[in-house]
Image (tube, grey):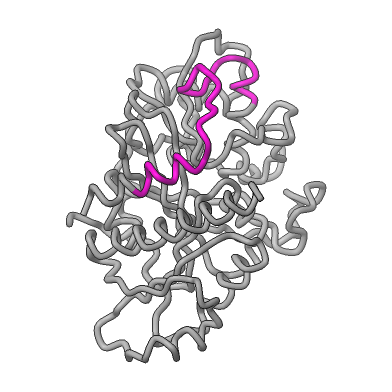
């Protein structure tokens, strides 16, 4: 009837991400997200797979972890996660606005690395 | 250190099978270690260098979780042109990126380490990786210093601070530091250090050298901006 099934990776990215074409600037490969609430029955299949990863999880996952776990391109997962944050299904682990300057983060990382050797 | 190289794709059998019920058509999900609920911030360091220079080994040595691999399909002839993605005539190649994670600051910070394929033709991917990175550790092998040039060129043009670590392979020739700096065309301020990527402590010291430099770099920039 129809031709051979296309490789799922060949699906146009905006189909996977339900219209969103760009990731939020604060959603990077290392950005950690945690599950919030909301019905998942209106979500697309890839978004549902992301949400199922969080089912029963006591902790978060970074965008990169999700991409590796679901074998999806990281660029697509950045957009999917952005979309799921917009809809309130996922949230950042910090509720308050994080105004800690990057310099402090660097100092903490330096202290952290030194404590490991 | 208990470390299985990522090139061994046998780890693909290590999966949690969640493909049950209505979602049964899904591919099985790969097992993943959750980020502890204590983590409120994350940071990223990129590990770059030529093919086979030991990026994945270093990440595996220092990571506290089993390193994972992401795969990004790149449409070669039309990178960056979305309209043409998915057309069957385009060559799609897959770029693999390995990454690991260290938890620190009493579990409040997760530091991610991403390995970057050295070839500059993967530039679109590089932008995703570089965005927000604290900095970059460039691994080099004295048997093939030229292999580092793609990564160094990318970093220089993107203005991302980096340190260079010579991965000391057994039998690699050693050269005086001045010669190495000249061969790699390093700025006098750029740190040049040595490490054994298979050794956790040695690899951590290379990351500390980088982070110390980033810290000085940032202090100088902050002072400059206040003038």
Quarter containing the N terminus of chain A:
top right
**Residue A46 placement (x, y as % from top left):** 57, 29
- Residue A29 vs B187, above or below: the answer is above
Q: Residue at x 52, y 41 (%)?
A: A102
Is A101 contained in the magenta span? yes
> Which range of residues does the magenta coloring cover?
A83-110
Q: Nearer the viewer, residue B163 or B19?
A: B163
When the figure is inspected, residue B81 is found, relative to residue B171, above or below; the finding is above
Q: Quadrant of the C terminus of chain A?
A: bottom left
Q: Residue at x 43, y 50 (%)?
A: B69
Name the residue rendered at 58%, 51% in the picture.
Answer: B223
Badge count: 0
Residue A22 locus on image (x, y percent): 72, 36
Q: Based on the displayed image, in which of its 4 quarters is residue B9 positioned?
A: bottom left
Residue reaching furthest front?
B227
Q: Quick check: is A67 in the magenta stretch?
A: no
Q: Where is residue B8? Give x, y as percent.
A: 32, 60
Q: Closest to the observer: A76 or B142? A: B142
| Viewer-closest of B161 and A88 | B161
Task: From this view, report whether residue B125 is shown above or below residue B110.
Answer: below
Which residue, as the protein is rendered here, is positioned at the far right?
B83
The image position of residue B4, as x and y in percent, is: 25, 57
For residue B123, side relative to residue B7 (left or right): right
User: Looking at the rendering, which quadrant does residue B213 occupy?
Assistant: bottom left
């Amino acid at each position: 009837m129809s031709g051979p099934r296309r490789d799922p990776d060949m699906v146009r990215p905006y189909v996977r991400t339900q219209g969103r074409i760009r990731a939020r600037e604060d959603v990077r490969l290392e950005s950690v997200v945690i599950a919030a609430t909301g019905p998942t029955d209106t979500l697309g299949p890839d978004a549902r797979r992301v949400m199922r990863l969080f089912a029963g999880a006591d902790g978060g996952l970074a965008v990169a972890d999700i991409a590796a776990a679901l074998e999806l391109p990281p660029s697509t997962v950045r957009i999917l996660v952005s979309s799921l944050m917009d809809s309130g299904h996922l949230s950042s682990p910090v509720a308050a606005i994080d105004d800690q300057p990057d310099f402090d983060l660097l100092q903490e990382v330096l202290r952290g690395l030194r404590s490991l050797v | 250190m208990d470390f299985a190289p990522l090139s061994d794709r046998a780890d693909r059998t290590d999966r949690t099978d969640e493909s049950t019920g209505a979602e049964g058509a899904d591919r099985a999900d790969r097992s993943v270690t959750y980020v502890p609920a204590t983590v409120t911030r994350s940071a990223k360091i990129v590990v770059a260098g030529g093919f086979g220079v030991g990026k994945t080994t270093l990440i595996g040595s220092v990571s506290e979780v089993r390193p994972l691999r992401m795969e990004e399909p790149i449409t070669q002839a039309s990178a960056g042109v979305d309209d043409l993605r998915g057309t069957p005539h385009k060559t799609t190649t897959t770029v693999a990126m390995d990454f690991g994670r260290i938890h620190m600051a009493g579990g409040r910070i997760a530091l991610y380490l991403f390995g970057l394929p050295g070839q500059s033709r993967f530039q679109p991917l590089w932008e995703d990786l570089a965005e927000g990175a604290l900095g970059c550790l460039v691994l080099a092998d004295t048997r093939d210093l030229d292999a580092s040039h793609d990564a160094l060129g990318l970093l220089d043009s993107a203005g991302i601070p980096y340190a260079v670590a010579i991965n000391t392979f057994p039998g690699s020739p050693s050269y005086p530091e001045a010669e190495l700096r000249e061969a790699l065309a390093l700025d006098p301020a750029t740190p040049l250090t040595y490490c054994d990527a298979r050794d956790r402590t040695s690899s951590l010291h290379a990351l500390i050298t980088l982070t110390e430099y980033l810290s000085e770099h940032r202090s100088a920039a902050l002072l400059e901006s206040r003038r």
